[in-house]
Amino acid sequence: MIRILVVEDDATTRKILSAALSRWGYEPVCAATAREGRARLAESGDIRLVLLDRGLPDGDGLRVCRALKADPRTRHLPVIVLTALDALNDELGTYKSGADLHLKKPIDLPVLKRYVETFLDRIPYRREDAQTLTCGALILTPRLRKVVIAAESLENFPAALFDLLYLLASKQGQAVPARSILQKLWGGRVRDSQLAVNISRLRRRLGPRLAPIVMSLRGTGYRIDVDFRPPRA
């Protein structure tokens, strides 16, 4: 399940956001202070998005945002800043801090849901030196194009196949429609049959013991099996 960090000092707002994220199929990880938020992020390396209150009891949320965007391990994380401030200078300050969105309180939950879905639908991997991505038994290291499945390591993975595997893994076990993969990786310029060819190439590169981690969903697309454990050799 995709995990979203909520850093919000107001208990009522935190409860509303947590309940909404749970209804939408995400796992909220909550913190009431900047310090607690940093600790939760360190403990949960698979956080995919941050909802960040600007007015925290131990500092300005924008300072937290700047720190996240300056750190190579977290700079790819989308950050949505939640604030009661609505002056133009406040909004510009939000974006200058590197945040992805300035969202005014009280939060319109349907609007927040659409933004969360949009940010999570982006491909976080852009060949930058990002932190590793973990999905079940699968661990991906973008800088090295390294694939590890249940402690079995595959080095120098082909770039196109790594991109495909990373896209699937970024959804944390959720189904990824074939059309979405075609659009994101090839701009919709190739046919479904070409995607099937690349899935076959990916499975061959993984080998017969590890290939079942990539599951085909008839009439839908593909997903990573988060419960996968390779059979013993």
Image: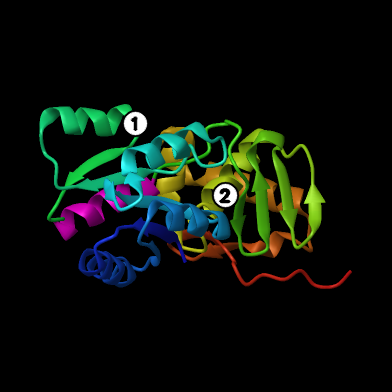
Query: Toward which corner of the image does residue 30 lie, by quadrant?
Result: bottom left
Give the amino acid type for the residue marked by disc 2 in the picture.
Ala
Compared to 209, does 72 lie above or below? above
- Location of residue 170 in the rendering, given as x and y in whole percent from the top left corner: 51, 52
Residue 147, position as x, y percentages in the image: 72, 48
In the figure, residue 91 lies in which quadrant? Answer: top left
Q: Quadrant of the C terminus?
A: bottom right
Magenta span contains residue 118: yes
Q: Main secondary structure of the magenta part?
A: helix
Task: Provide the residue span drawn in magenta.
Answer: 108-121
Q: Nearer the viewer, residue 157 or 108?
A: 108
Q: Is residue 107 above or below residue 64?
A: below
Query: Is any part of residue 177 visible from this angle?
Result: no
| Spot occupied by residue 46 in the image (x, y as percentages of width and height) | 54, 56
Instruction: Say which label, 2 or 1, has the lower sequence index.
Output: 1
Give the SS element for disc 2: helix
In this figure, which residue is indicated by the disc labeled 2? 196
The residue under label 1 is: 97
The answer to which image quadrant residue 156 occupies is: top right
Q: Residue at x 71, y 59 (%)?
A: 211
Badge 2 density bin: few <14, some 14–19, many ≥20, Cα 10 Å: some
Looking at the image, can residue 221 be seen? yes
Which element carries disc 1, helix, strand or loop? loop
